[in-house]
Structures are given as C-alpha cells and as structure tokens.
C-alpha cells in the first residue's frame, strides 16, 4: 500500500534533520543546489528525496531563532512570503493544495514546511524556477 501524504511528510521532515557533530543542522545542511529563493533574512529550499509530492519546501530564517522570537518585522515578512508562496504553488497545475506546517522540536532556526501533493492526474513536480521567479517579483533572488 502506498504511503499516505502524512507519512510522506513525516519521512521528508525526518530525513532533513541530520546534524553535523557540534553544528546547527540547518547551517550545516543548507545545500546551495537545493536553494530555491533567498533574501537577506530568509532561505527557501527544496527537500531532498521528495519525489512523492509536487512540492516540499522549507522556509527558514538565516539567523538562529525560535518560534515566538521573531521581531515584528521578521514576523511580517514571514506572513507576506508564506501567503505569496501558497498562492503561487496553488495556482500551478501540478499541485492540488498546499499544507503549511511547522514540524519538530527546536532546530535552531524558525522554520515552516510547505507541502503540496500532486493534482489529480499528474505526477510532475511544480516548476521550482517558476516558483522562485514569481516570489522574486516581490524581492529576493531566484536560485532555482
């Protein structure tokens, strides 16, 4: 029996938590080839091994922070970025909808997951270049 969407999410999130000895896992594992979009405060990266989803993206702060510790400016930026990202992905034909979630215990950086299952009848991932370019229309740099 194939995995449920929830099981896929859990596997993807668990796989990204590999910590380098003595280092913050997010700082150690931000791979340049997985960065989709970035600006001076935020990094949006794609999850590795997420072929079962149209999109699996992680938005995180560059600086070490916890949930509830964002200043008003960063919190406002997060709201705008998250809202735009959901609108962009949900308007692509490959995605059905977007789940926005925070999984896991303290990880060193404020982080939120964006998971989009495939739309009915498709098994193609969303075009991350298109996502990055549209997000960059409001600022930051497209990397995908």
Image (cartoon, helix red, strand yellow):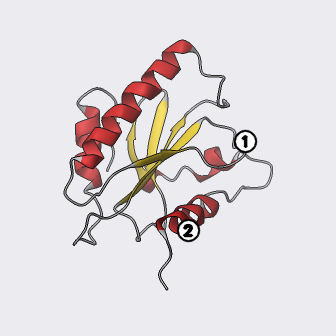
Question: Looking at the image, is 95 positioned above or below residue 58?
Answer: below
Quadrant position of residue 138:
top left
Residue at the disc numbered 1: 106
Q: Is residue 121 left or right of residue 109?
A: left
Q: Is residue 1 left or right of residue 102?
A: left
As rendered, which of 11 and 15 lies closer to the eye?
11
Where in the figure is residue 65, as x and y percent of width and height?
66, 29
Mark 1: few/some/many CA within 10 Å (<14, 14-19, 20+): few
* SS at circle 1: loop
Question: Looking at the image, is 51 positioned above or below residue 56?
Answer: below
Q: Residue at x 53, y 42 (%)?
A: 112
Where in the figure is residue 126, as x and y percent of width and height?
27, 58
Tell me if I can see residue 142 in this picture. no
Q: Residue at x 62, y 46 (%)?
A: 26
As rendered, which of 122 and 43 lies closer to the eye?
122
Quadrant position of residue 110:
top right
Q: CA distance from mark 1 to mark 2?
A: 21 Å
Question: Looking at the image, is 121 positioned above or below residue 139?
Answer: below
As rendered, which of 86 and 59 lies closer to the eye?
86
Residue at the disc numbered 2: 7
- On residue 119, the disc is none
How many dots with numbers?
A: 2
């Amino acid at each position: 029996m194939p995995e449920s969407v929830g099981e896929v999410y859990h596997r993807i999130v668990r796989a990204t938590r590999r910590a380098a000895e003595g280092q913050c896992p997010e700082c150690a594992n931000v791979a340049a080839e997985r960065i989709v979009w970035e600006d001076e405060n935020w990094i949006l990266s794609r999850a590795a091994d997420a072929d079962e989803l149209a999109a699996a993206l992680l938005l995180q702060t560059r600086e070490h922070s916890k949930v509830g510790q964002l200043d008003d400016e960063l919190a406002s930026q997060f709201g705008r970025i998250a809202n735009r990202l959901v609108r962009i992905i949900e308007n692509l034909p490959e995605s059905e909808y977007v789940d926005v979630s925070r999984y896991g215990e303290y990880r060193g950086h404020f982080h939120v997951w964006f998971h989009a299952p495939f739309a009915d009848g498709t098994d193609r991932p969303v075009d991350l270049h298109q996502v990055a370019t549209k997000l960059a229309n409001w600022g930051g740099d497209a990397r995908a």
